[in-house]
Image: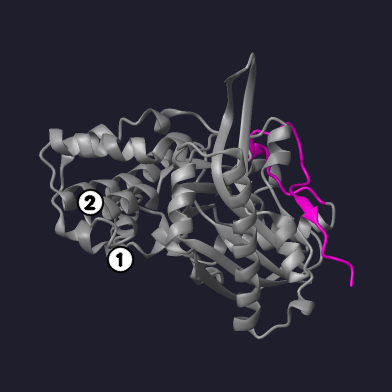
């Protein structure tokens, strides 16, 4: 099958699209990435996504409109990708769309008398199927949560298919808005795989850059701003006391925790410790790397030998993060995912192509040891293409 995978992360920069050729079934599933591209959101839509994801008020009617509008944008991105890849939409068997997360509460909290966990991804899959003529799988996280899991991370299943190794212990690190790791011990069996969100990745850095440049820049290209900042050990020490880092896995997080309220906290810390704008950007960048290192030291390396750290996501292009990881993890090779065949910016979209393929074949693709679910779940909901 030719399958499109689509992903928009917590930074809401746009829609990443990957085209994959997939055949077979685990453990002999074959998947090849044929191309990847990205389509940016209109500025107004992006601002509204971020506003809603920060839990700002929205009416039911406006949320319904946003859901369908995003479905149209995802459909547009799929068709634009087909044109770029020079493949007819009629040849595409399936789309896997993660959608846009606007709320994620992985752990149950009291709600109207009962502990409740929930997640909400928008970008209506039926609109995607209707406008592209391609059967679409969406809403992947809810089935895992219905079995008591956190609904995240979901990429470990794909990491296991791509990166398990008979002789090497590996960790797959994705640096999107949030950082998450998948731990793959040497010769791992599926139930030995575990994964969790380690903390922030690009989310805090991007927020600081946007704040200090008044929106003129969205991210710190090549860590140029961070490189101009000075180290502020007192500020960094306070960040590293973040209680999320001490929470035991399984755990997941997002903009609900590391969003605008956390940005205000960093700005207040900067004022307290005399940090200039680039000093704060540098501190957030180093905090991203060291929170990953902290997670590895606290929850992984004491019991699992790791030989390689495979890095993907936008943060894989940040030289300061990579340098910090290499310096703090002696004896572990830090390498970009492109070295193993999947470009850093295509990894998550490629993953949702694979997850959709498994769903279409009625096979479970969560990893209960990663999410905390009671057992396997067939992920997602299928919106069928209109009849010919």
170 versus 241 height, above or below: below
Q: Is residue 57 or residue 99 the one in the foreground?
A: 57
Gap in Å between the C-alphas at discs 2 and 1?
Answer: 13 Å
Q: How many numbered callouts? A: 2
Q: Would you say 385 lies left or right of 104 here?
A: right
Q: Is residue 7 or residue 125 the one in the foreground?
A: 125
- State the image coordinates of residue 312 (x, y, percent, origin top left): 48, 61
90 versus 67 height, above or below: below
- State the image coordinates of residue 82 (x, y, percent, origin top left): 66, 78
Q: Residue at x 57, y 28 (%)?
A: 107
Residue 315 picture quarter: bottom left
- State the image coordinates of residue 38 (x, y, percent, origin top left): 52, 70
- At numbered mark 1, what does the secondary structure look like: helix, strand or loop? helix
Q: Is residue 241 magenta?
A: no
Disc 1 crowd rating (10 Å Cα; few below 14, some 14-19, many 20+) is few
Q: Main secondary structure of the magenta part?
A: loop
Task: State the quadrant of the C terminus.
Answer: bottom right
Mark linked to residue 54: none
Extreme residue toward the right, this view: 388
Q: Residue at x 54, y 69 (%)?
A: 340
Q: Please name the residue that numbered disc 1 is placed on.
A: 221
- State the image coordinates of residue 205 (x, y, percent, origin top left): 31, 51
- Judge whether residue 173 can be spotted in this image: yes
Extreme residue toward the left, this view: 274
Q: Is residue 12 or residue 140 the one in the foreground?
A: 12
Q: Is residue 301 or residue 325 the one in the foreground?
A: 325
Q: Would you say 342 lies left or right of 276 here?
A: right
- At numbered mark 2, what does the secondary structure look like: helix, strand or loop? helix
The span picked out in magenta is 363-388
Q: Earlier in the sequence, mark 2 or mark 1?
A: 1
Task: State the quadrant of the N terminus.
Answer: bottom right
Q: Please name the residue that numbered disc 2 is placed on.
A: 282
């Amino acid at each position: 099958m030719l399958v499109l995978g689509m992903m928009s992360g917590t930074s809401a920069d746009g829609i990443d699209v990957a085209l994959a050729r997939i055949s077979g079934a685990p453990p002999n599933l074959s998947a090849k990435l044929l191309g990847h591209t990205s389509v940016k959101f209109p500025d107004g839509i992006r601002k509204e996504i971020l506003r809603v994801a920060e839990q700002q008020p929205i009416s039911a009617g406006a949320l319904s409109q946003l859901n369908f509008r995003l479905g149209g944008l995802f459909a547009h991105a799929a068709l634009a990708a087909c044109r770029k890849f020079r493949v007819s939409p009629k040849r595409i068997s399936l789309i896997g769309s993660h959608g846009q997360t606007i709320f994620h509460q992985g752990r149950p909290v009291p709600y109207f008398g009962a502990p409740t966990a929930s997640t909400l991804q928008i970008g209506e899959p039926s609109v995607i199927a209707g406008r592209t003529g391609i059967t679409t799988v969406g809403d992947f996280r809810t089935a895992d949560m219905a079995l008591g899991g956190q609904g995240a991370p979901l990429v470990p299943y794909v990491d296991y298919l791509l990166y398990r190794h008979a002789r090497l212990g590996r960790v797959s690190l994705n640096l999107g808005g949030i950082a998450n790791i998948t731990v793959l011990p040497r010769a791992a069996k599926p139930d030995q795989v575990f994964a969790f969100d380690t903390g922030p990745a690009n989310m805090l850095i991007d927020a600081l850059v946007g704040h200090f440049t008044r929106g003129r820049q969205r991210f710190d290209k090549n860590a140029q701003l961070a490189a101009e900042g000075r180290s502020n050990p007192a500020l960094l020490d306070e960040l590293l006391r973040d209680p999320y880092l001490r929470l035991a896995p399984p755990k997941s997080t997002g903009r609900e925790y590391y969003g605008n309220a956390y940005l205000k906290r960093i700005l207040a810390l900067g004022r307290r410790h005399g940090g200039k704008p680039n000093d704060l950007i540098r501190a957030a960048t180093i905090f991203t790397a060291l929170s990953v290192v902290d997670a590895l030291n606290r929850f992984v390396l004491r019991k699992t030998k790791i030989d390689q750290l495979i890095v993907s996501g936008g943060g894989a292009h940040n030289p300061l993060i990579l340098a910090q990881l290499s310096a703090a993890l002696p004896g572990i090779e830090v390498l970009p995912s492109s070295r193993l065949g999947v470009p850093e910016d295509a990894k998550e979209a490629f993953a949702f192509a694979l997850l959709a393929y498994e769903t279409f074949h009625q096979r479970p693709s969560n990893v209960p040891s990663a999410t905390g679910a009671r057992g396997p779940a067939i992920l997602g909901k299928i919106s069928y293409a209109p009849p010919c």
